[in-house]
Image (cartoon, rainbow, N blue to C red):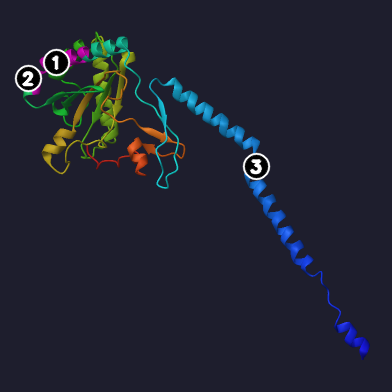
Amino acid sequence: MARRKHEEEHENHERWLVSYADFITLLFAFFVVMYAVSSVNEGKYRVLSDSLVNAFRSAANVEGASIVSPPRDNGSPVPVIIARAPKPDPQAEAQRTKQRAKMRNMADEIRKVLEPLVKGGQVRVNEGIHGISVEINASVLFAPGGAQLGPPAVRALQAVAEVVAPADFPVTIEGHTDTTPINTPSFPSNWELSAVRASSVVRLFVGSGVDPRRLTAAGYGDQRPIADNSLAEGRARNRRVTILIESMLPDTATASSPARVSSVDGALGTPEELRLGQSAPAASTPKPASAAR
């Protein structure tokens, strides 16, 4: 009985070492994790460094390029590269001015040689940044459902060819129809009709002295209407041949256009848009227009 009492009174005064050892172990593990997180992966760091150097080098090649850091919504900066339009080259600007003047004179000459048809609304001559568009109603050139040029059409197109021949601008001849179906031995569909009509004009241009290397014939059938095919007037407008004279002028950004920026996370927009968390919408592909002949 005395022995059992003696055993119950025995007490271990070193139990605190167990808790202390657990605490030290956890503390060691904590510092190991902290060290692992804070250590830099040299390989990844080198990849990031090389990418930044290449990006900045590309930006430096663009005259006027600068690097800014618009803030995110959470306040952290996002490095972006702003590629501003390069300063205009006086020689290139003089060349562009000369090209524009030549295109303007050519458009005036085409209006002059086709003046009766222009006044009658059967021919439309338009100028744009990409060149000259001469839209000729198919009734002026061809019989219904045919692709043979009549004598009046030959004379009118030869006059246009004489204006176009001395220049060196590329020329595309487009044939268009309305939605009225066609099914003949010569033209199983509007595709063949529009293509052969465009080719007929190309052959006449070649015979009138236009360099064939500058010419392209394209038939679009009824797939590019410019008027409502449900109306007779619209169908007559859609039956056309379009002569496109390309200006070959490079697209240049205007001074009034804000600089576009590309951030490291792929956002695109102006610095103000990125600051507000707004990026420019992606360009959408237009849906095909309703069918026309």
Contact check, label 1 and label 2, Cβ < 8 Å? no
Callout 3 amino acid? Ser
Residue segment shown in magenta:
101-118
As displayed, is residue 185 above or below residue 243?
below
Label 2: which residue? 116
Residue drawn at (42%, 35%) of the image: 69
Q: Residues within 10 Å of mark 1 (few under 14, many from 20)?
A: some
Label 1: which residue? 108
Element marked by disc 3: loop
Callout 2 amino acid? Pro
Residue 111 visible in this rendered orientation of the protein: yes
Query: Residue 265 in the image: x percent, y percent?
Result: 46, 40
Q: Is residue 105 left or right of residue 192?
A: left
Element marked by disc 1: helix
Residue 108 inside the magenta-drawn segment: yes
In what quadrant of the picture does the C terminus appear?
Answer: top left
Residue drawn at (20%, 13%) of the image: 101
Q: Residues within 10 Å of mark 3 (few under 14, many from 20)?
A: few
Callout 1 amino acid? Asp
Label 3: which residue? 39
